[in-house]
Structures are given as C-alpha cells and as structure tokens.
Amino acid sequence: MMYSKEDLMQDLKGMGLKPTDALMVHSSMKSIGAVDGGADTVVDTFMEYLKEGLFMTPTHTWAQMSREYSTFNPATEPACVGIIPNVFRQREGVVRSLHPTHSIAAYGPNAAEYIKGEENATSPCPPGGCWDRLREIDAKILLLGVTHTRNTYIHSVDEVLRIKDRLTDEPTLMHVVMPDGSVKDVPMYRHFNRTLGTGNFSEEFDKMKQAFYDLGAAKPVKFGDAECILCEARKIFEVCEKLFSIEENCVIDRDVIPEHWWK
C-alpha cells in the first residue's frame, strides 16, 4: 500500500492527538512503509496537523561530536537520528536548539521560546532543559517504529532524579556556533555507565515497556505500517520515579523488572 498525507493524517487523529498538542517524535522512516512523497510528506503531515501546537523531533549529534570534532553549528550539522529529523530541521519556520549533542527541532507558535537557553546546558538532558520541560507542557512522545531504547526523555528522568552512574566523570569541551556567528565554549558531560562500559545504556530502557502500558503512561498506536508507542511525558516520569525508588539501577542491574513492583 502507498500511504498519502490524508491517510497519515487519519492515523494521527486515530491516536487521539489534537492539533494543539505538543508532540516529540522519534522515528524510523522505513517502518512506515511506502509513502507518496516520502519523508517530505511525513514531515508535512506532522507540521500541518500540529500547526496550532508544538511539533518536535530530536536533532541529536552525539554520534559525531567528540574531543576532535567539537564544533556544533546548528544551521548545518546533520542529525544522527534519521531522515525525518534531517528533513524537518531544514524547513521554513523550524527552529533548532543550541545543545551541542542533544538538540531538538521545533515548529509552532511558541517554538522559539521553548528551545531557548540550551547552549548553557552542561549535560545531555539537564533539569529545566528542553527534554525535562516536556512534562511541564504536558507533551506526548511518539515512538514511531522504534521502542523506548530511543526514548531520550528517559535520560531526562535520570538526570532530574539524579540517578547515579549515568554521566562521564569529566566533561568534553565543545563549541557552539551562536546565531550572531560568535562561538560559545561549552563543557559537556557525556552519557556513560560504568557497569555496562558504554554510553548507549538506553538499550536497557525497554525493560520498562510493560510498566508504562499497565500504568497508563503509554499505549500502542499505528502510523502507516509502523507499530508505534504514544507516551505521556508526565506519566512516563511518574512510572520511572516509582520503579527507581524501589531500586535505582534496576534497568541496568536486572534482566527483567518484577511486575509486582507496579501491580
């Protein structure tokens, strides 16, 4: 089947989304199937449907940013998270935050105000930053053809709750090209877990999937052919807080999180 923009609009409506909602979308384009117009049509769909709200995608650059490659220019630096964010970030009216590793692109009446200040962050998803404020604005998070292993918001929960062993001991000095052309030096702590020996510990986040479903923080939905998960940021935070209060490092230390913890 070849999906049209109208088909995809109906899928958004079927999820229960409103045009005034704030929505963060993590995406896999290939999971959607054949779309008339490709990624441009997908971006058109979200921008038009949410034109009264706030449409956001991650435009992360953590994969390429390093001590050696340390200058982030938000106007030109590609995102490392797929084709949809890279099409979206270049659209007229879309703004991009100035975080050197975990930027977002946003579109809507309050988008420019929402992304302010990220050049002052010294960690990936700090308290009070763009990712943390998703719960403040009662945002939803759509995992489009991906799982919670790509749910960056959970990193924000970790930082707000001060979960141990999530960041490097020392920062990496990075440089952000500001809108006026000046360059701001930013010391940035990176994701790292010593138990696993990697910064990619979000691969463990899917262990909480059933708890999110059972406690009403997430529900399965569809978009084209893609199996998706629609989450509520505020409720995701509450479920994580509940589980981490029982055992702070449960997603790292356990293969399975016991259902009786939330049932």
Image: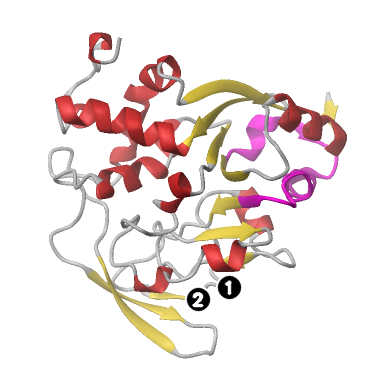
55 in relation to 254, above or below? below
The image quadrant of residue 196 is top left
In this rendering, position of residue 106 left or right of residue 162:
right
Name the residue rendered at 67%, 56% in the picture: 88
Report whether 204 appears left or right of 100.
left
Asked whether disc 2 touches disc 1, contact meaning CB atoms under 8 Å apart, the reply is: yes
Q: Secondary structure at mark 1?
A: loop
Give percent across and percent down for residue 167.
20, 53
Residue 258 image position (x, y, % from top left): 23, 12
Tell me, for residue 43, which label it has, or none: none
* In this view, 42 is above or below 206: below
Residue 76 marker: 1
Magenta stretch encompasses residue 47: yes
Mark 1 neighbour class, 10 Å CA radius: few under 14, some 14 to 19, many 20 or more: few
In the rendered image, residue 127, in percent from the top left (x then y), is placed at 31, 56
For label 2, the residue is 73
Q: Quadrant of the C terminus?
A: top left
Q: Nearer the viewer, residue 19 or 104?
A: 19
Which residues fall within the magenta stretch?
A: 27-55
Look at label 1 and name its amino acid: Thr
> Dot 2, how many residues are within 10 Å of its Cα: few (below 14), some (14-19), or many (20+)?
some
